[in-house]
């Protein structure tokens, strides 16, 4: 399974960006996977941002609630993250991830259940 993120860039505080993550691979079907976005800023640990399971249940990090929206389109194996009202603290490399086995909602924003990861796309918020 190959995950490829796109849509990162430079944006001013208060601006918006939309990220996409396209999955590809032999016989790939992520309909039943839990998909998530993580981010890692320089000198900081990677943190879970948003996750969406196969039933459409969603979990957000407290720091992005009300500003970020995660969605998925199973028909084209794509995960999205709409980011609004961005601030300086949102600057990071953003990664998408896919977890194929079942795991509880309490772990949706923890990285250990996810087995496939993209290479990341950089988001920089700066004036």
Image (tube, rainbow, N blue to C red):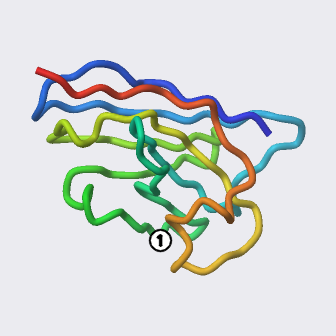
Asked if residue 22 is positioned above or below residue 77 in the image, the reply reads: above
Which percent across, then down, holds residue 125? 22, 28
Residue at screen point 47% across, 51% down: 45
Q: How many neighbours does mark 1 have within 10 angstroms: few (below 14), some (14-19), or many (20 or more)?
A: few
Q: Is 36 in front, or is 125?
A: 125
Count of number-bearing discs: 1
Which quarter of the figure has residue 119? top right
Which quarter of the figure has residue 60? bottom left
Q: Is residue 59 left or right of residue 108?
A: left
Residue at screen point 72% across, 47% down: 116
Asked if residue 52 is positioned above or below residue 116 in the image, the reply reads: below
Which percent across, then down, holds residue 4? 62, 29
Residue closest to the far right: 26
Which percent across, then down, holds residue 65? 25, 61
Q: Is 91 in front, or is 25?
A: 91
Secondary structure of the residue carrying tag 1 is: loop
Q: Is residue 84 left or right of residue 18?
A: left
Which percent across, then down, holds residue 46? 49, 50
Residue at screen point 71% across, 52% down: 30
Which residue in the structure is indicated by mark 1? 57
Asked if residue 50 is positioned above or below residue 24 in the image, the reply reads: below
Q: Quadrant of the C terminus?
A: top left
Q: Is 86 in front, or is 80?
A: 86
Which quarter of the figure has residue 11? top left
Residue closest to the far front: 43
Asked if residue 56 is positioned above or below residue 122 in the image, the reply reads: below
Q: Is 119 in front, or is 17?
A: 119
Residue at screen point 48% across, 33% down: 20
Q: Is residue 42 left or right of residue 124?
A: right
């Amino acid at each position: 399974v190959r995950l490829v993120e796109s849509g990162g860039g430079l944006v001013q505080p208060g601006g918006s960006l939309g990220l996409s993550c396209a999955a590809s691979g032999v016989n790939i079907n992520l309909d039943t996977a839990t998909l998530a976005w993580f981010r890692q800023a320089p000198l900081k640990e990677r943190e879970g941002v948003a996750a969406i399971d196969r039933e459409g249940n969603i979990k957000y990090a407290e720091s992005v609630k009300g500003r970020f929206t995660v969605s998925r389109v199973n028909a084209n194996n794509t995960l999205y993250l709409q980011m609004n009202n961005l601030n300086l603290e949102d600057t990071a490399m953003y990664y998408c991830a896919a977890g194929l086995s079942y795991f509880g909602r309490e772990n949706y924003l923890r990285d250990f259940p996810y087995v496939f990861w993209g290479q990341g796309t950089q988001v920089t918020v700066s004036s």
